[in-house]
Image (spheres, grey):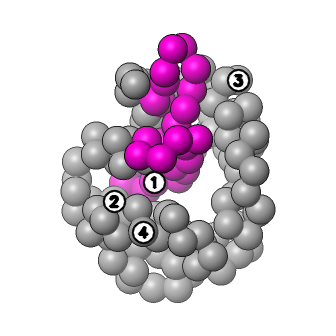
Amino acid sequence: MKIRSCLRLDLEPVYHFIQAVPFKKEVFIKSSKKEIEQKINTSFVCEENGKIIGVLLVKNDYIDTIVSTRKGVGTKLLSVLKGRYFVHISCKNQSSKKLFANFGFKKIKEDICQGQKRDYYEAIL
């Protein structure tokens, strides 16, 4: 596995990877191409044999998206971050809640994100 940091994403493969994730919208809000282009200034892509197996999209101190197709990849992606970060997580997304809790993220409030109820978390990594 190789984690690659990018200031500019290879938009098409990342977009298609995110769109292929089989989660309901209530659990995982999928970014559009326009949202990826406009919002993301730092990203990390985890690849194996040239194929994307995980994506972490970050803008400033906000984790916009983290998704992977293999257990443990999310942990590897989050481990590259240093500093104070925030993230919205669906109360229905138990795997993300567990992942972020392992990194010390604490719920600071309930919030609305893209018209959906989400919990808002913060941590210093």
**Residue placed at 43% from the left, 56% from the top?**
62
Query: Is there any visible trace of residue 71 in the rendered image?
Result: yes
**Residue placed at 36% from the left, 49% from the top?**
75
Is the N terminus in the top left, top right, bottom left or bottom right quadrant?
Answer: top left
User: Hey, which quadrant is residue 11 in on the image?
Assistant: top right
Question: Callout 2: helix, strand or loop?
Answer: strand
Q: Position of residue 35 (x, y in %)?
A: 67, 44
Magenta residues span 45-73
Image-based side of 106 in relation to 27, left or right: left
Question: Callout 3: helix, strand or loop?
Answer: helix
Q: Main secondary structure of the magenta part?
A: strand
CB under 8 Å between discs 2 and 1: yes
**Residue placed at 63% from the left, 39% from the top?**
36
Count of numbered labels shown in the rendering: 4
Query: Within 10 Å of the Cα at label 1, are there few (<14), some (14-19), or many (20+) other Cα atoms?
Result: some
Query: Within 10 Å of the Cα at label 3, are there few (<14), some (14-19), or many (20+) other Cα atoms?
Result: few
Instruction: Give the residue pinned by disc 1.
Output: 63
Relative vertical location of residue 44 with respect to residue 122 in this rendering, above or below:
above
Q: Nearer the viewer, mark 3 or mark 4?
A: 4
Between the C-alphas of marks 3 and 2, the distance is 26 Å
Between the C-alphas of marks 2 and 1, the distance is 7 Å
Instruction: Give the residue pinned by disc 4.
Output: 98
Query: Within 10 Å of the Cα at label 2, are there few (<14), some (14-19), or many (20+) other Cα atoms?
Result: some
CB under 8 Å between discs 1 and 3: no
Between the C-alphas of marks 1 and 3, the distance is 20 Å
